[in-house]
């Protein structure tokens, strides 16, 4: 059993490496080296039923031990969760490949001179739509996007069913956490959010649409205070204040080149951790791109910091909420007015600062809405009921309409939205912890760098619950709600 588990861990690490590189190439707008089916074929044990059985059995035995070994349990849980996902890919490789390739396929036909430009890929629309000033034009682009993506709902449903067959299950705390996030920010979203949507996107109360929310998040009135050419310099200024090597000794490789199929924002992927972590970034004007770059830096540092002889689970796998927390902990530096002034060199009015804060509110609420809709999908399948639940939850979260053709696009059977909610909660608690220990300017205090390095240096080993315990408290949405409320004042 131990020999077979060792083989499984090695094969799972190889598949994780191959999938990470595939995700990186897609985000960077580069061609793929192999199909998903070829990757799965090269790692048969990691995506087999036998491999899953071995992982589940080993995890069960570890949990039954007395005394328990938390590190062993955490690593086996991460292994089991990865093998579950690999098994789902093996059950429906065709649907998985279709969905993986979908953003790059020329499917979106915008109104007007379609004969000249033809169909465009989703990634092109995702890059342009939020920054389009004309509300009418944004609406046309979003309608075309909805029409183009809805036919893939069949593949989404097939992939969802494969995930459930492999063992994907909702977590019981999902509804409670999501409801607390929504209830705790309802007033902010309705009052400040409604006013800013009208002020920045021209959407009057009761008439807002998804594209209006995207326009507020990506292109608020203060967007020009964050020029695309200054974003990397902003991050470097912050790193110098903290005396932090953002390249992790050269391990973090930054790709800031523009390509037609490159995704907006930033993404960090382990290519050969801890020796090489790819960080691909598309510079763009506005605070959203800066927040995305900061978040990717946090994830990249986590991937690059563990020792080279760390177990493969620490290098390749881990608690998704912790990875999100490492990203959000840096992204939410934009809610610190002094960080914006000193590092981004931007002088913002109080209303502009509130626009940055309401973006964080909407992000948290949208994650909560997706978590609730995913619960419905687990109950009824990824179909009409789940789509209706997502549209209703999205309307509650943003007071805006989610097009029917996009209602199933962002639902995930693996509790991804819940992991993001938990990551936001943990990041908010970490910020409060650093503020208590290193004062209000913790974000530029070199003493706080040691705390960051202590987190990053363990890679994927710690769980979300363990990090909460290290900060002396139980998981709670209260630190996040307090941070959002304070930032919106």
Image: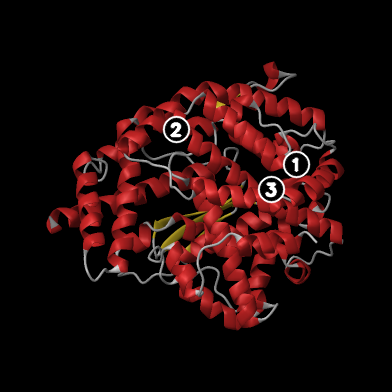
Looking at the image, tell me whether mark 2 or mark 3 is earlier in sequence order: 3
Residue that appears at 50% across and 25% down:
383
The residue indicated by pointer 1 is 215
239 left or right of 12?
A: right
Residue that appears at 58% across and 67% down:
429
The answer to whether residue 288 is seen in the rendering is: no
Estimate the x, y position of residue 130 in percent, counting from the top left.
72, 40
Residue that appears at 19% across and 57% down:
6
80 left or right of 51?
A: right
Estimate the x, y position of residue 402 in percent, counting from the top left.
66, 31
When asked about the image quadrant of residue 103, the answer is top right
Badge nearest the viewer, 1 or 2: 2
| Quadrant of the frame with the N terminus | bottom left
Circle 3 residues within 10 Å: few <14, some 14–19, many ≥20: many
**Alpha carbon separation for disc pair 1 and 2:** 33 Å
The residue indicated by pointer 3 is 362
Secondary structure under badge 2? helix
Looking at the image, tell me whether mark 1 or mark 3 is earlier in sequence order: 1
């Amino acid at each position: 059993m131990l020999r077979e588990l060792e083989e499984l861990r090695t094969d799972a690490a190889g598949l994780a490496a191959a999938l990470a590189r595939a995700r990186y190439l897609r985000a960077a707008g580069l061609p793929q080296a192999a199909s998903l089916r070829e990757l799965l074929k090269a790692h048969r044990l990691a995506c087999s039923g036998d491999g899953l059985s071995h992982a589940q059995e080993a995890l069960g035995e570890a949990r039954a031990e007395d005394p328990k070994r938390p590190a062993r349990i955490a690593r086996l849980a991460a292994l089991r969760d990865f093998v579950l996902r690999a098994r789902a890919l093996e059950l429906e490789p065709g649907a998985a490949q279709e969905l993986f390739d979908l953003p790059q396929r020329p499917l979106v036909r915008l109104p007007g001179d379609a004969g000249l430009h033809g169909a465009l890929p989703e990634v092109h629309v995702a890059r342009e739509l939020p920054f389009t000033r004309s509300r009418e034009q944004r609406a046309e682009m979003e309608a075309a996007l909805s029409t183009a993506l809805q036919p893939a709902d069949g593949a989404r449903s097939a992939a969802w069913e494969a995930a459930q067959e492999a063992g994907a299950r909702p977590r019981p705390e999902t509804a409670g956490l999501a409801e607390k996030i929504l209830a705790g920010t309802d007033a902010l979203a309705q009052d400040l959010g409604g006013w800013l949507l009208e002020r920045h996107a021209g959407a009057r109360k009761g008439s807002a649409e998804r594209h209006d929310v995207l326009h507020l998040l990506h292109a608020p009135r203060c967007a020009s205070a964050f020029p695309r050419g200054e974003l990397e310099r902003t991050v470097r200024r912050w790193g110098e204040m903290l005396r932090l090597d953002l390249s992790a000794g050269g391990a973090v490789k930054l790709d800031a080149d523009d390509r037609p199929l490159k995704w907006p924002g930033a993404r960090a992927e382990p290519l050969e951790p801890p020796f090489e972590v790819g960080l691909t970034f598309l510079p763009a004007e506005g605070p959203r791109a800066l927040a995305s770059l900061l978040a990717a830096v946090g994830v990249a540092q986590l991937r690059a910091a563990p020792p080279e002889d760390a177990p493969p689970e620490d290098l390749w796998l881990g608690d998704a909420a912790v990875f999100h927390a490492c990203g959000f902990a840096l992204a939410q530096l934009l809610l610190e007015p002094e960080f914006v002034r000193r590092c981004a060199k931007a002088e913002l009015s109080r209303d502009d600062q509130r626009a940055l804060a309401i973006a964080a509110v909407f992000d948290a609420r949208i994650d909560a809405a997706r978590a609730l809709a995913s619960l419905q999908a687990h109950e009824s399948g990824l179909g009409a009921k789940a789509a209706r639940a997502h549209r209703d939850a999205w309307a509650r979260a943003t007071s805006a309409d989610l097009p029917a053709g996009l209602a199933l696009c962002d639902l995930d059977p693996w509790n991804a939205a819940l992991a993001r909610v938990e990551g936001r909660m943990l990041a908010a608690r970490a910020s409060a912890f650093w503020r208590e220990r290193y004062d209000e300017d913790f974000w530029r205090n070199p003493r706080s760098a040691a705390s960051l390095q202590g987190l990053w240096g363990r890679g994927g080993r710690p769980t979300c619950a363990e990090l909460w315990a290290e900060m002396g408290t139980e998981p709670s949405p209260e630190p996040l709600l307090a941070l959002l409320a304070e930032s919106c004042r």
